[in-house]
Image (cartoon, rainbow, N blue to C red):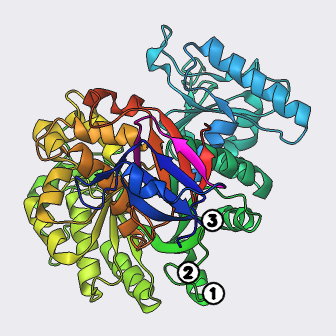
């Protein structure tokens, strides 16, 4: 006699995503696992008197989403602090900050008044927030409003006074009214000047706990059951483990530790996939290059809007074309963009990680950087067991796609980045039309047999938005079917975390991590996939979002 299920989801359109077209009508869950998938009749036998039965009324049931690339504390911080993203004037942004100032003053626990996500491009008065605007927020407390792109912030007089000495002068904007041309600071600071801001507002453990709680609630609301979180010099690992111990985690967290922590991870004997059911050690995360937006991704061909190879090493940019030969190792030191971690250092990181049986996740956006990451994995004698990953891999040549297919390396990419590959978008300016359409070629990668994992990089954290972007992508080689996109966001991401035996499909024996959608992504207009509501999210058999 089979034991009764704890929970049965019935009258559903279950897409198992195990086989591309496999569907069922009901799922039974017991002790945190899936125990039966089949027709209403077959699964109905699993319902006992104690069993909770949810009639899904024809809704779509999928394996819960796994986001393979997140920065959860930042998501939480934006939810907890003043949200300036919807403010449609400087005045409204100031009002929201003032409300946040009053709230935190009441609690008496924080001095800094912070807001995130302002975007002046839609304001009738199209200008950055200034010191004068922000001085109206509070008497005597430091106030910071960070712009949507996180490369620019506006400070009030108190914050500016405190941090200005630590900021590079060229990154602190000033008006030009002074007698000598160097006027008063406007309150706007950019790029490296933000380092001082981040250091000053570094959350303590209690704050970080608050951010993580907010972020996990948001993730569950969007159908996310697991994340691969990138962690660098932060209380996050301690917070994740504390919440796990307290039984308060509703999101499975795989921690990818930055290379700063490689020695510590080795010393503690942590190995990839060590941990509990909820918190596990993942990969060692490293950069190679920068970003397309910042013109710091390492490209083999110049940026379309900076023929002299962009911001990089402008000093001798003039004779760059004559010098533009390949270096001996095939990783051209004269190519456009910038190494954040150069190929030699990368090889060393991979070798040290492999000695300790640790997976490596290398951020590589430009084709030169992807080539360098592949070379580092190859030179370390990668067998495929490590399941190393390249994060982003946005600009790929055909040759690189072939090499990736031969290598067993996982491409962990962001379908939501395709929002920049649209006609007239950021990638059209940076890369030109040909390379815009050749960026993020997910269709070509899947055709070649490259393991593909999807994640959001929290821009924004929202799997269905990403699915919409890739299903409606402008280029033929970029586009995926709804099924393939959902598979990359479930089993693909699980595979990138060596977790495909537990997660990523709706099959008996897998963890009971599911999402129930109000509408079918196969049935709605593709441009509306991102607007589909999540009805329920289930993690380990518990409903963590939604109610009957
Ligand atoms: Zn990231």
**Magenta-span inclusion, residue 53:** yes
What range is drawn magenta here? 50-62
The earlier-in-sequence mark between 2 and 1 is 1
Determine the residue positioned at 55% across, 81% down: 274
Q: Quickly name the residue at label 1.
A: 268
Q: Quadrant of residue 488?
A: bottom left
Element marked by disc 1: loop
Quadrant of the drawing holding the C terminus: top right
Contact between marks 2 and 1 (CB within 8 A): the answer is no
Element marked by disc 2: loop
Rendering coords of residue 242 (x, y %): 74, 66
The earlier-in-sequence mark between 3 and 1 is 3
Determine the CA span between mark 2 and mark 3: 20 Å
Rendering coords of residue 439 (x, y %): 20, 47
Nearest the camera: 60 or 356? Answer: 60
Rendering coords of residue 267 (x, y %): 61, 89
**Left or right: where 456 falls relative to 47:** left
**Left or right: where 458 falls relative to 375:** right
Q: Quickly name the residue at label 3.
A: 233
Determine the residue positioned at 58% across, 18% down: 87
Q: Quickly name the residue at label 2.
A: 274
**Left or right: where 529 falls relative to 303:** right
Rendering coords of residue 263 (x, y %): 56, 84
Determine the residue positioned at 59% across, 42% down: 218
Q: Nearer the viewer, mark 3 or mark 1?
A: 1
For the question of whether residue 168 can be seen, the reply is no
For the question of whether residue 248 can be seen, the reply is yes
The earlier-in-sequence mark between 2 and 3 is 3
Query: Total label count?
Result: 3
Determine the CA span between mark 3 and mark 1: 16 Å
547 vs 392: above or below: above
Nearest the camera: 317 or 249? Answer: 249
């Amino acid at each position: 006699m089979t034991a009764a299920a704890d929970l049965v989801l019935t009258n559903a359109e279950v897409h198992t995503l195990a086989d591309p077209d496999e569907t069922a009508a009901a799922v039974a869950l017991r002790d945190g696992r899936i125990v039966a998938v089949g027709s209403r009749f077959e699964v109905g036998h699993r319902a006992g008197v104690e069993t909770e039965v949810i009639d899904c009324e024809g809704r779509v049931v999928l394996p819960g989403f796994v986001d393979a690339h997140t920065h959860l504390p930042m998501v939480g911080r934006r939810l907890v602090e003043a949200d300036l993203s919807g403010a449609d004037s400087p005045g409204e942004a100031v009002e929201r900050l003032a409300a946040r100032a009053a709230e935190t003053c009441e609690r008496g626990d924080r001095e800094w008044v912070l807001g995130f996500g302002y975007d002046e491009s839609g304001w009738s008065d199209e200008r950055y927030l200034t010191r004068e605007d922000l001085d109206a927020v509070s008497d005597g407390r430091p106030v910071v409003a960070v712009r949507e792109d996180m490369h620019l912030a506006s400070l009030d007089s108190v914050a500016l006074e405190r941090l200005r000495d630590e900021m590079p002068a060229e990154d602190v904007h000033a008006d030009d009214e002074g007698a000598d041309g160097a006027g008063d600071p406007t309150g706007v600071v950019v790029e490296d000047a933000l380092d001082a801001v981040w250091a000053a507002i570094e959350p303590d453990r209690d704050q970080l706990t608050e951010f993580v709680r907010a972020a996990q609630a948001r993730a569950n609301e969007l159908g996310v059951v697991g994340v691969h979180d990138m962690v660098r010099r932060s209380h996050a690992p301690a917070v994740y483990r504390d919440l796990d111990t307290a039984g308060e985690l509703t999101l499975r967290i795989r921690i990818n530790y930055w290379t700063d922590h490689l020695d510590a991870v080795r010393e503690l004997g942590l190995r990839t996939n060590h941990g509990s059911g909820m918190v596990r050690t993942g990969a060692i995360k490293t950069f190679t290059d920068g970003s397309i937006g910042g013109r710091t991704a390492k490209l083999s061909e110049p940026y379309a809007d900076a023929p002299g190879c962009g911001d990089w090493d402008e000093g001798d940019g003039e004779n760059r074309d004559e010098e533009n030969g390949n270096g001996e190792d095939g990783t051209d030191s004269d190519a456009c963009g910038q190494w954040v971690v150069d190929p030699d250092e990368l090889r060393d990181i991979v070798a040290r990680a492999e000695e300790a049986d640790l997976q490596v996740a290398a951020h590589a956006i430009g084709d030169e950087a992807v080539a360098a990451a592949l070379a580092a994995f190859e030179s370390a004698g990668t067998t495929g067991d490590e399941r190393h990953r390249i994060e982003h891999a946005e600009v790929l040549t055909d040759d690189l796609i072939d090499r990736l297919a031969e290598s067993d390396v996982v491409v962990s990419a962001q379908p939501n980045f395709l929002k920049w590959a649209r006609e007239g978008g950021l990638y059209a300016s940076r890369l030109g039309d040909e390379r815009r359409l050749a960026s993020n070629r997910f269709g070509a990668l899947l055709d070649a047999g490259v393991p593909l994992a999807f994640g959001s990089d929290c821009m924004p954290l929202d799997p269905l938005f990403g699915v919409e972007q890739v299903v409606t992508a402008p280029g033929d080689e970029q586009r995926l079917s709804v099924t393939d996109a959902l598979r990359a966001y479930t089993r693909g991401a699980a595979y990138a975390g060596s977790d495909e035996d537990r997660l990523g499909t709706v099959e008996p024996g897998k963890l009971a991590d599911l999402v129930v959608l109000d509408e079918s992504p196969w049935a709605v207009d593709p441009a509306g996939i991102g607007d589909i509501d999540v009805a329920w999210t289930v993690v380990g058999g518990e409903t963590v979002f939604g109610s009957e």
